[in-house]
Structures are given as C-alpha cells and as structure tokens.
C-alpha cells in the first residue's frame, strides 16, 4: 500500500492498495511509520476509486498540510505480515531506517524469544514489538534492532 497524493482540503488522501481490501479492514487501525516508529491511525472514511485505489480519510488528519505529510508513506495493517514467521524465509531483513541487514534463512520459534536467522548464521530477536513493518509483496521485514546487537 502507498499513499499517492492528498485529495481536497479536508485531509483526504488517495491510497493505492492492490493487495488489500481496505473497505473490509476499515474498522482496524492502519499504521504509518514516523521517525522509525509505527503510528496507528483510525479510518474515518474509505471510498473505492477504481483500479485498487481508495479515497481515505483518517481521524485527526484534517487539513491539506497534514495530508501532504502522508504522501509517499506506505501504511500497513497490523497483521499484514506472517504471524508465525514460517513464510518469511528468503525475505530481506532491514533495520528501522531501511538499511539492509541480510537475507532471512530461517525462523526460530524460541519460546519467549522468537528469532530470525540471517545469512551467516546470526540470530536476531524478532518479537512482535520490534517488528516495524512486513512487506509481503517486496519480501522485506523491518525490525527495530537494538543498538549494538549486530
């Protein structure tokens, strides 16, 4: 998903979401990364615009200026990623700033400390609270990796 442009003066945006039925998920918060952290927004209004595009109005985004800050962002729903990690093998692991760390070769479901193994054998903790974003289409996983871990 990607916010393509602002729409109108009341804070609306046009969202491209080819793989997500945004209308069905309108009661869920959508997350947008700001300063490396996911920020939840609730959907006030959603209207299909054709071609996998939607008009979207988010709660508290009520001006053209605020809507412009969202342009180019890639919002996501909390469970857009794989909950159990089995399908993230082969994904590229990135830190919260977008720097590529390496290719994920395995998911280790260690009780209380799930980890991903990256090329070279290093294990990186991957609890839900450290996951910034998962993009299944581009096969990427972003983690808030504690400083000094790698």
Image (cartoon, rainbow, N blue to C red):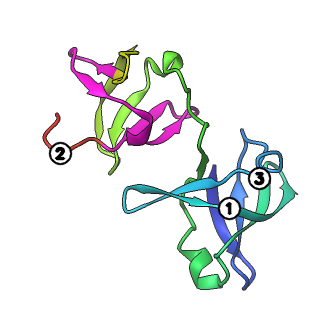
* Residue located beneath label 2 in the image: 147
With respect to residue 99, does 108 lie above or below? above
Q: How many marks?
A: 3
First-in-chain label (1 vs 3):
3
Query: Of helix, strand and loop, which one carries label 1?
Result: loop
Q: Quadrant of residue 58?
A: bottom right
Residue highlighted by disc 3: 27
Q: Is residue 57 above or below residue 11?
A: above
| Residue 41: x %, y % from top left | 62, 62
In space, the residues marked 3 and 2 are separated at their CA atoms by: 35 Å
Where's residue 37, x and y in %? 41, 56
Q: Is residue 65 left or right of residue 144?
A: right
Q: Is residue 136 left or right of residue 89?
A: right
Image x and y of residue 17, in percent: 71, 48
Mark 1 highlights which residue?
42
Examine the structure image and report whether residue 122 is included in the region drawn in magenta: yes
**In this rendering, which labeled residue sits more in front, label 3 or label 2?**
3
């Amino acid at each position: 998903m990607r916010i393509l442009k602002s729409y109108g003066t009341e804070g609306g945006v046009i969202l491209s979401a080819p793989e997500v039925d945004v209308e069905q998920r309108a009661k869920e918060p959508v997350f947008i990364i700001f300063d490396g952290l996911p920020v939840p927004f609730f959907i006030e209004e959603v209207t299909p615009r054709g071609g996998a595009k939607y008009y979207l109005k988010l709660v508290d985004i009520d001006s053209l200026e605020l809507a412009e800050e969202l342009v180019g962002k890639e919002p996501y729903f909390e469970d857009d990623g794989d909950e159990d990690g089995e399908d993230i093998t082969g994904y590229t692991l990135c830190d919260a700033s977008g720097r590529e760390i390496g290719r994920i070769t395995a998911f280790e479901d260690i009780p209380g400390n799930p980890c991903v193994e990256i090329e070279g054998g290093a294990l990186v903790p991957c609890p839900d609270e450290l996951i910034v974003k998962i993009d299944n289409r581009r096969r990427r996983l972003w983690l808030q990796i504690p400083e000094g871990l790698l």
